[in-house]
Amino acid sequence: MSAGPEEVQPRGPARLAEIGRLAAFSDGVFAIVITLLVLDLRVPEYHQGELLTSLVREAPSYLAFVVSFIYIGVLWLNHHALLRLVRGTTLALSWINICILFGVVIIPFPTAVLASAPVDGDTDDLRVAVVMYALAAALMSAPWLVFFAYLRRHPTLRAGQIDQGHVHAQEARPITGLVLYGLAGLLGWIVNPLLGLLGIIVMIIYHGVTSEGLRTGPLQWVRTGRRG
């Protein structure tokens, strides 16, 4: 009997679910979350002739929105590249993906906290907000590490041309996220919250630059015909 539209024949004894539905669901979650961020933007209250002053006072809120918008965009790029490593999914892999998406959907909350702290709070409040954001980002790295480890242990899930060495190399990226996001939060708490925020931004840039993987660049994906 031939495989149905929801399944593809694997190289091992098990049958793999087709990856398209998982990718579509994930893209939908990313789209909703990145849209929800704009709900935290607000027109400030102001008296006549003081609109510019009020807008400037809300600048931290706009900065938090921009940082998180870029962050979610970077996460989507990383997730897009992640799914190109597999040719099908299993129940376990789908649950790991759900854990990844859980980390994505909580981003609007620390973003709202980070946006409000400089406007309505003091330095201590900003310190708490930065630590909360860094902690959320660090914890988000954990399911990515589990995804790579699972893929390394189950070679029948890997797409063609994806070898063991490539998958193993990618585990360094979420480990780096766990350590350095945590360090950014520690610096934000002990030294200065702005220093912690700078560390978060640097890590977002790092994940953006390495979104195609540590050993595989965009041009190689084009040459091997594996563009998504």
Image (cartoon, rainbow, N blue to C red):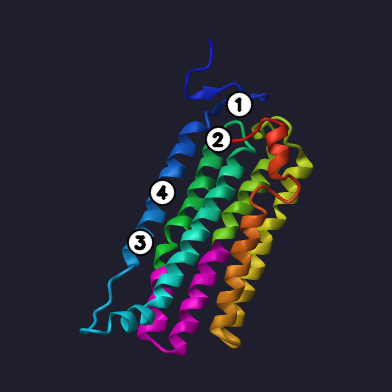
The amino acid type found where label 4 is placed reads: Ala
Which residue extends farthest top?
A: 1
Label ID, residue 38: 3
Q: Is residue 110 visible?
A: no
Instruction: Give the residue at mark 2.
Output: 90
Mark toward the start of the polypeptide (2 vs 1): 1
Q: Are marks 3 and 4 in contact (CB under 8 Å)?
A: no
Q: Most extreme residue toward the right, as rendered?
A: 165
Tally the marks.
4
Q: Earlier in the sequence, mark 3 or mark 1?
A: 1
Residue at 58% of width from left, 40% of height from top? 83
Residues shaded magenta: 111-139
Residue on which the image places disc 1: 14
Q: CA distance from mark 1 to mark 4?
A: 32 Å
What whole-number distance in Å separates the C-alpha atoms at marks 3 and 1?
A: 43 Å
How packed mark 2 is, by other alpha carbons closer than 10 Å (few <14, some 14-19, many 20 or more), is some
Q: Secondary structure at mark 2?
A: loop
Residue 214: % across, % down: 73, 51
- Residue located 56% across and 43% down the image: 80
- 117 in magenta: yes
Q: Is residue 163 magenta?
A: no
The crowding category of the residue bearing disc 4, from other C-alpha atoms within 10 Å (few below 14, some 14 to 19, many at least 20), is: some
The disc, 3 or 4, on the residue closer to the chain's N-terminal end is 4
Q: Name the amino acid, label 3.
A: Val
Q: Give x and y (percent) for residue 40.
A: 34, 67
Q: Residue at x 61, y 87 (%)?
A: 191
Q: SS of the residue at dot 3?
A: helix
Q: If you read the primary sequence from the N terminus, does the residue marked by circle 4 or circle 2 appear first?
A: 4
Q: Read off the residue under disc 4.
A: 31
Q: Residues within 10 Å of mark 1 (few under 14, many from 20)?
A: few
